[in-house]
Amino acid sequence: MADSLSVAVVGATGAVGQEFLTLLVERRFPFRSLKLLASARSAGKRLAVGDQELVVEELRPDSFAGVDLAFFSAGAGVSREFAPRAVAAGAVVIDNSSAFRMDDTVPLVVPEINPQDLRRHRGIIANPNCSTIILSLPLYALHRAAGVKRVVVSTYQAVSGAGARAMQELEEQLQQVQRGGEIVARILPVASLPHHYPIVHNVIPQVDVFAEDGFTKEEWKMIRETRKIFHAPELQVVATTVRVPVLRSHSESVAVELERPLSVEEAREVFASMPGVVVQDRPEDQVYPMPYFTSGTDPVYVGRIRRDPTVPAGLLFWVVGDQIRKGAALNGLQIAEWMRQEGMI
């Protein structure tokens, strides 16, 4: 194993790409060189990475010569085209898009849950959907302790999940409201669709496009990815995903039915024992997780833990996590850290 790696970040100018750059420095990931890759329109931009300034290069078929590790965060189309090229050039790819998540030959990994799956990678590792990662940590803790039979989850997803342009649009709409002018919507719920709605003072019950069954792609991602990560193809999961006017950190309301009952006190202990999970559950003191306070932090926070009186072994809880960090860049970097620790890169 080399002392340090040659690393590339594809989509370096995007919200997740920039978070990768921040975390590489914060967590002192050992790289001897760092290549910032993006589309032609971003080529030539300069980005600060720690105490140095690097120039963004245009992503090209030959961009991965000499690269050991490539983080992809530029969308599924880019990943499908360029990730195989990176692997062919000798790089290990950790892909943050949906391109390979449900490919049976590609590990879909949350390091606190199923790091052993990394041992069967063929060059590409998939980073799960942000909402799936945030759900999976506390849910797996329960699954390990008492067996999860059924999950009903409703999300309250920050606009950063739709990218930097959506974050900018929320800020612009706030200013438009303050000026009393027309509210302009161009991005949400989905930039490529014909109709766009304001997110300021609004809640949009659509994240991603709809399938014929009335569920969105985001909802199906949560369902299918959770089953794959848990190695539980029969796990009953259903989701409703919603966009809310929050800049960062997704929130989720979760109802679970367990194989055996857990008391609220036992559930708190189970959650607290899970790496990456912080329990904030003192409702008598109005202590519970909120995106305002969790943005920019690494853990997934759990609160509002209570019994569900409608089923024999049911629990309800509230979970919040910064989906740009643990929901995206941090999880990807933790995958690389685990692989490096195990001598795999």
Image (tube, rainbow, N blue to C red):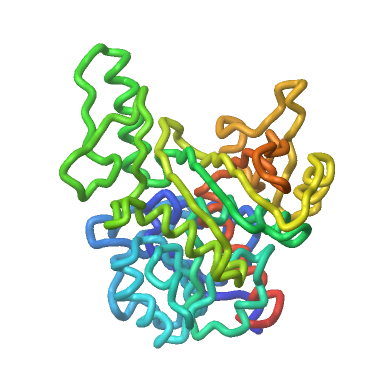
Q: Is residue 262 visible?
A: yes
Residue 9: percent from the left, percent from the top?
44, 65
Based on the displayed image, in which of its 4 quarters is residue 282 positioned?
Answer: top right
Q: Please state if 57 lies on the left or on the right of 266 as rendered.
A: left
As rendered, which of 73 and 2 lies closer to the eye? 73
Percent x, y of residue 65: 40, 82
Q: Is residue 254 or residue 73 the one in the foreground?
A: 254
Total residue callouts: 0
265 over 183 or under it: above or below: below
Q: Quadrant of the C terminus?
A: bottom right
Residue displayed at 72% across by 56% down = 141
Q: Nearer the viewer, residue 266 or 107?
A: 266
Q: Is residue 51 visible?
A: no
Position of 204 with respect to 146 (left or right) is left
229, 191: nearer the viewer: 229
User: What residue sits 61% from the left and 44% below the top?
Assistant: 255
Q: Where is 275 relative to 287, above or below?
A: below
Task: Locate residue 14, reporting x and y percent.
Answer: 38, 52
Q: Residue 17's image quarter?
A: bottom left
Quarter of the picture holding the N terminus: bottom right
Please, is residue 291 above or below residue 144 in the view? above
Estimate the x, y position of residue 256 in percent, counting from the top left.
64, 48
Going 34% across and 61% down the picture, which residue do you hit?
Answer: 75
> Which residue lies at the image location 34% right of the left edge and 65% below the top edge?
76
